[in-house]
Amino acid sequence: MSNDLVDYALELADKKHCEYSEARYQKTSDVTCFTRNGNPEPAVIIDAEGIGIRVIYDGALSFGATNLISRENVKDLVEKVVKDAKAAAAVTAEKIHFSQEESHVEKWGVQEKKKVDDVSVESMISFLREIDKTISEPLSDVSFPNRNLYAGYNTEEKYYANSDGSRLESRVPRVAYLGMIVCLYNGNPIPITIPPGYSGLGGTGGWEIMENLNLVDYVPSQLKEMMPGIKASAKPPKDETLDLILGPNVAGLTSHESCGHPGEADRILGREGAQAGESFLKADKLGMQIGSSEAYVSDDPTIPNSMGFYMYDDEGVKARKRRLITAGKFTEFLQNRATASYFKIKSNSSSRAVQFDREPIIRMANTFIEPGDWTFEEMLKEVKRGIYIKSFMEWNIDDKRLNQRYVGLQAFMIENGKLGEAVKNPVLEITTPKYWGSIDARASDIKYTCGTCGKGDPMQGAPVFFGAPHIRLRNVRVSSR
C-alpha cells in the first residue's frame, strides 16, 4: 500500500505541473538496551513511519511529510507542498535546479545471517551483562565505579520514487555498541569510552556483526591498554614543537571534522550556516592546496557492512566513492543534486535523510584517511623526539572547521625511535591547513569506528564510519591541558 501511495503522490505532483517531484516512504525502528553497573535500565524503543514529499515548482523547492498513510492525506500533503513552492517561487530570486541524473529501478538491501528483529531485549541485556562482568573488578589500582554499556539495532526500510523514473526499494539493518565508563584512580574520576573517543563499534548487517566483535575480550583488553595513560597523572608533556604520530582513533575523527564537514557543498554555499556550522572553503576553492602530498581523504558509502553503507542516496543517485583530498588538494566536494547543478557537475550521491519527516541533505557516509605503505614501526624509527597519541578523550572545532583541538588519552613519549613513558593529556591545537600540511607518512593499518554525525535543523543524526591508519606529522606544537 505504501508503495502505491508514493507513486500516487508523483502522479498528483505531475498533474500540478511541478518541474520535479519525489516521494519517499520510510520506516525506521530503533531498539537500544542499556545497563548501569550490570543492572538493566528501561530499553528505548522508537518506531517512525511515514511519507515525505519534495517538489520543485518554478525554481522553488518545498518539502513536507505525513505519518497518516492514506490516499486522502497524501493528496492533502501534495497540495500543501505545491502551494508552499508556488508561494516561495514568487519571492525567491535564485532558482533551484537539480542536476540531470540517470534513473534507477532496483530493490537492494543488506544481508543478515542473524536477523536483528529476532534479537530480544532480554538477550541484549544478557549480552551487556556478560561484558560488564569482565570489567567490574579493579585493575592495576584503578576501579570502575560507573559502567554504562549500550547495545542496540536499527532497521531502515524505504521505497523511493521520483519524476525522473527512479523506483528504489531497500532495507538496511544496523547494530552498534558503546561503553561509557568512569575510572577512579587516587580519588580522581576519569571518564572514558570503549572504544576511546566517543565512538562505537558496529555496522550494517545482522546481529552476527555484534557477536563477531568478541566484546567480552575486547573491552577488558582496551581498559588494560589504557592503564598507563590513566595513571600517568604527574607527567604532562612540555609545551614544544616536535613530531607526532596519531593512531587511527584520533586521525579518523580529523578526517570527518576537518575535511568531510568543510567539504559539504551546502555549507560552502551558505545554507547550513545557521544550522550546523559553516566552512572555511568557498565555491571557487576546488583544487585548493590544503595539505602535503601525503594528505589523502575519501568518503565511501559503498564499503560493505560499514555503518554509513548505502547503494543509492535519497535523491535516487547511485552511490560511489568520493575522493575529497588527493595529494593535499581538495579534489571533490560532497554534493546533492541542487548543489551539483550550481557547480555544473553530477551529484556524487551525498544526499541522505534519517527519517520520513526529514528533508534529504548533504551528509558524509564513511570518511577516512587513505592508507599508505608505511608500518607503524617504520614511522616510529624516524622520530628523534615526539609523542604518540594513540587515542583521544576530548576534542572541539570551530564552526568554519579551521581551528581544532584534540586531547590525548593514551599517549607516550618517543625518544630516538622508541616508545617511552606515558604522558598525560597532551593537547594538539592546530589549524586545518597546518594539520593536513604536516602529514608526511601514512601506515597501511586502517581501522574504522562508528558514530552518529549531527547536522541540520531539525537535527538529523546520521550513522557514519570514521577511519584512518596511523599517520605521522612533522614539527607541530603540542602542549598540556
Image (cartoon, helix red, strand yellow):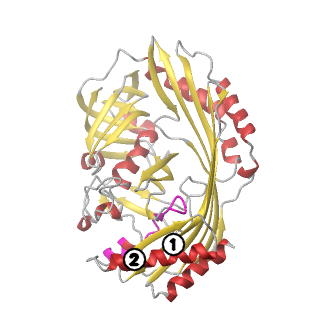
Q: Is residue 35 above or below residue 89?
A: above
Instruction: Name the residue at 34% across, 64% down.
Output: 265
- Image spot of residue 169 (x, y percent): 63, 70
Was residue 196 drawn as part of the magenta stretch in this picture?
no
Residue identified by numbered label 1: 53
Judged left or right of residue 156, residue 185 is left
The residue type indicated by label 1 comes to Ile
Residue range in magenta is 339-357
- Image spot of residue 149 (x, y percent): 60, 32
Instruction: Name the residue at 40% across, 18% down.
Output: 232
| Quarter of the C terminus within the rendering | top left
Residue identified by numbered label 2: 85
Secondary structure character of the magenta stretch overall: loop
**Which of the two labelled residues, at mark 1 and mark 2, occupies the earlier sequence position?**
1
State which quadrant residue 23 falls in.
Answer: bottom right
Judged left or right of residue 280, residue 331 is right
For the residue pair 210 and 147, the one nearer the viewer reads as: 147
For the residue pair 19 and 210, the one nearer the viewer reads as: 19
State which quadrant residue 120 falls in.
Answer: top right
